[in-house]
Amino acid sequence: MHGSGRLVPIALGAALLASCENAGRDRVLGVQATGIVRGLVYFDRNGTHTPDAGDTTLSGIGVRLIVSATLDTLGRTTSDAGGLFRFGAVPVGGVLVAVDSTTIPGDSLQVTRIDVPRVTVTPGDSFVVRIGVSFPQLSVLQARGLPSGKKVFVVGVALNDVTAFGDRTVHLADTSAALLVTGVRTLVVTGDSVRLLGTRQTRSGEPTLDNPTVFRLAVGAATPAHPVSSAMAANANGGLFDAALVQLLGATVQDTSTVAGNRQLTVTDGSGLLVIQLDTTAGFRRAVLVSDTIGAKLDATGVLVPGVAGTWALFPRAPADVVVK
């Protein structure tokens, strides 16, 4: 981290709150023409946008006071080893609190919250401002558009159990898009609402979020699947449905094969060919799979996974995702 690099766990009710309680010591008898602005710079580790027990303080972060009326810089200071900063003898009136972005470490961190960005200083009063520094929180679609290597928070709903396909991948969706999450080390089940902190990477030419820290928010309702034709699923609707949950109705099995121990069905609803992979990790067994027959008709729900030459395959998450007509 910047400066001393010291990260000190935030003890709520300690240094910062004590500074509030002691604000009266800065007052003297009579009306003063100045006040005090003080505060805390913290590293928001879990993306809650509020300081809590899981966060740490940040030292060496430059803070400025700007006069609201003129936008002139009134004063500069730097957060100390405990993340605290202080401006004394601030003239009464409106001031803005700003952070010198060049003092924030790394290329992914940014100021994510200033709880009181505008302060009206009154004589003899003391104001406390908390400044949160963290990784940006983006929609799934925005995260897909990031360059590789950027670290980001993304909130969404898990479309599959982390154990469904054996490679610790989870498909995550919000209202904007879906995204493949790789290297998931925490138990995540279908329907979980989660906040993930991971690094934008690429697999098979498509964006991924890799090696995330998982913050479980709630168990939510199942996400509806996008209705698709077999041709639309095979190109993921021009790539827009990459990693998404889709449903194909009334398809006919044209061919079957075994690839790396998993059964693959080539199907069509008349619009074009699509590969459906029946992963053994997801619970599919050839001996009991009625649909594994040329000419069989079925409905299939699953997530779309990119393959070769700009094509996608549909991966059902469990045998219940495949219904023989």
Image (cartoon, rainbow, N blue to C red):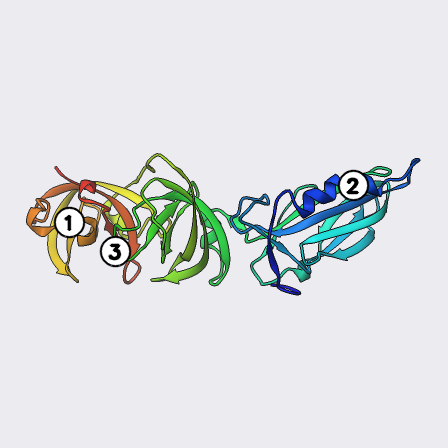
Type of the residue with mark 3: Gly
Q: Residues within 10 Å of mark 2 (few under 14, many from 20)?
A: some
Q: Is residue 258 above or below residue 68?
A: below
Tell me the quarter of the image containing the C terminus: top left
Secondary structure under tag 1 reads loop
In x, y percent, where is residue 172? 38, 47
Residue ID at (49%, 61%)? 147
Type of the residue with mark 1: Phe
- Which circle marks residue 166 in the picture? 3
In this rendering, the count of numbered labels is 3
Indicate which label's residue lies in the foreground, 1 or 3. 3
Type of the residue with mark 2: Ala
In x, y percent, where is residue 315? 24, 50
Real-space Cα separation, disc 1 to disc 2, in angstroms? 67 Å
Mark 2 — residue? 23
Residue ID at (17%, 53%)? 280
Secondary structure under tag 3 reads loop
Marks 2 & 3, CB-CB < 8 Å contact: no
**In this orientation, which residue lies closer to the viewer: 169 or 26?**
26
Mark 1 — residue? 284
In x, y percent, where is residue 275? 20, 53
Real-space Cα separation, disc 1 to disc 3, in angstroms? 13 Å
Dot placed on the residue nearer the N-terminal end, 1 or 3:
3
